[in-house]
């Protein structure tokens, strides 16, 4: 019964992290994919000891590089 309660508490904590679109140590690949979506790039390295992988996510911020001005003669906006 104690293990079931421990599993429930872990699942509730993971659900909270997924709701905030976060990632924590110990989350499974499925939980990370639920939280962040599909990765932009994945890589897997296999060695004699096992395999290690990494998922990369690229987050873009839109930066406006233009200024809107008002034409004093017509009163219309332009860039």
Image (cartoon, rainbow, N blue to C red):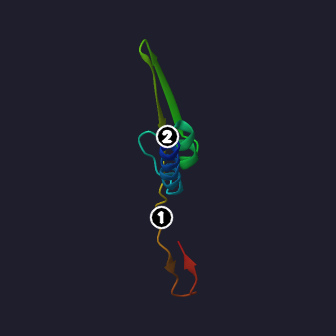
Q: Number of marks in the image?
A: 2
User: Under tag 2, what secondary structure?
Assistant: helix
Seen from the viewer's position, the closer of residues 45 and 51 is 51
Residue 38: x and y in percent read 58, 42
* Mark closer to the observer (2, 1): 2
Choose between 62 and 68: the one closer to the eye.
62
* Badge 1: residue crowd in 10 Å (few <14, some 14–19, many ≥20): few
Secondary structure under the numbered disc 1 in the rendered image:
loop
- Image position of 70 with respect to 2: above or below: below
Circles 2, 1 touching at the beta carbon (< 8 Å) = no
Q: Residue furthest front?
A: 1
Residue 3's mark? 2
Few, some or many C-alpha atoms within 10 Å of disc 2 (few <14, some 14-19, many ≥20)? few
Residue located 43% across and 11% down the image: 48
Real-space Cα separation, disc 2 to disc 1, in angstroms: 52 Å
Q: Earlier in the sequence, mark 2 or mark 1?
A: 2
Q: Where residue 50 sits: x, y (%)?
A: 45, 18
Task: Establish if 41 lies above or below 48.
Answer: below
Question: Where does label 1 land, which residue?
Answer: 64
How far across and down, in percent of the image, does residue 60 sit?
Answer: 49, 52
Where is residue 66? Give x, y as percent.
Answer: 47, 67
């Amino acid at each position: 019964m104690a293990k079931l309660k421990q599993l429930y508490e872990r699942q509730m904590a993971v659900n909270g992290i997924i709701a905030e679109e976060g990632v924590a140590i110990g989350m499974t690949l499925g939980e990370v994919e639920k939280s962040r979506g599909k990765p932009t790039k994945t890589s897997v390295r296999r060695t004699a000891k096992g395999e290690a992988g990494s998922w990369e996510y690229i987050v873009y911020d839109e930066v406006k590089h233009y200024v809107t001005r008002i034409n004093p003669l017509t009163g219309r906006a332009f860039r």
